[in-house]
Image (cartoon, grey):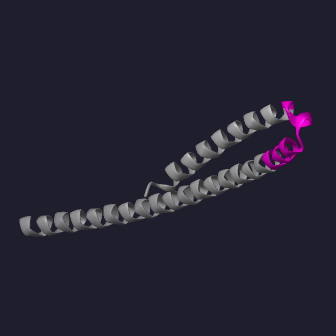
């Protein structure tokens, strides 16, 4: 399975294509609306489908944005914790170097 961003981007692309195709079909049906009641019902169904697809597109966009924000926060937290750990390692390395210098100085005396 792909990463969440790829899946969301693919879903948004498919939804956008479906909206475009449905709108085109809706426009075609509009031009024949007066000819048949069935086409009128079809047009109503297509308009409902457009509304539904727009809603789905909006919700998917919001979900994608939420996932991106969540991952961003997780990355920031991880980077912060790594920075703290690196500082601690640097401090320990300085302590070890200082202890080594002290030991070396005492041995030379």
Image coordinates of residue 55 in percent, x first then y, are: 75, 52
Is 20 above or below relative to 106? above
Left/right placement of residue 56 relative to residue 102 reads: right
Residue 45: in magenta span? yes
Q: Residue at x 61, y 53 (%)?
A: 64
All told, the count of numbered labels is: 0
Report x, y in % for residue 95. Answer: 28, 67
The magenta segment: 31-46
Farthest right residue? 34
Where residue 100 appears, as percent x and y from the top left, is 17, 66
Pick the front one: 59 or 84: 59
What residue do we see at 81% from left, 46% from top?
Answer: 42
Judge by depth and name the residue closer to the eye, 105 or 20: 20
In the visual, does 100 lie left or right of 66?
Answer: left
Residue 73 relative to residue 101: left or right: right
Q: Say whether residue 37 is magenta.
A: yes
Q: Which residue is found at the position 45% from the left and 58% from the top? A: 79
Determine the main secondary structure of the stretch shown in magenta: helix
Name the quarter where the N terminus is drawn. bottom left
Depth check: 71 or 18 in front?
Answer: 18
Q: Give the side of residue 6 with respect to residue 42, left or right.
A: left
Q: Relative to 77, is 60 above or below?
A: above
- Quarter of the figure that contains the C terminus: bottom left
Name the residue located 24 percent from the left edge and 64 percent from the top edge: 98
Q: Nearer the viewer, residue 98 or 28?
A: 28
Rendered position, 58 above or below 87: above
Relative image position of residue 70 (x, y in whole percent): 58, 60
Residue positioned most to the front: 36
């Amino acid at each position: 399975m792909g990463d969440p961003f790829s899946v969301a981007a693919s879903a948004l692309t498919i939804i956008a294509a479906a909206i475009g195709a449905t709108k085109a079909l809706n426009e075609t049906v509009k031009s024949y609306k007066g000819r048949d009641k069935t086409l009128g019902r079809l047009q109503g169904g297509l308009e409902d489908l457009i509304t539904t697809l727009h809603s789905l597109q909006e919700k998917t966009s919001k979900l994608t944005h939420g996932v991106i924000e969540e991952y961003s926060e997780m990355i920031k937290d991880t980077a912060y914790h790594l920075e703290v750990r690196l500082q601690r390692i640097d401090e320990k390395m300085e302590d070890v170097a200082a202890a080594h210098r002290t030991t070396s100085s005492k041995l030379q005396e």
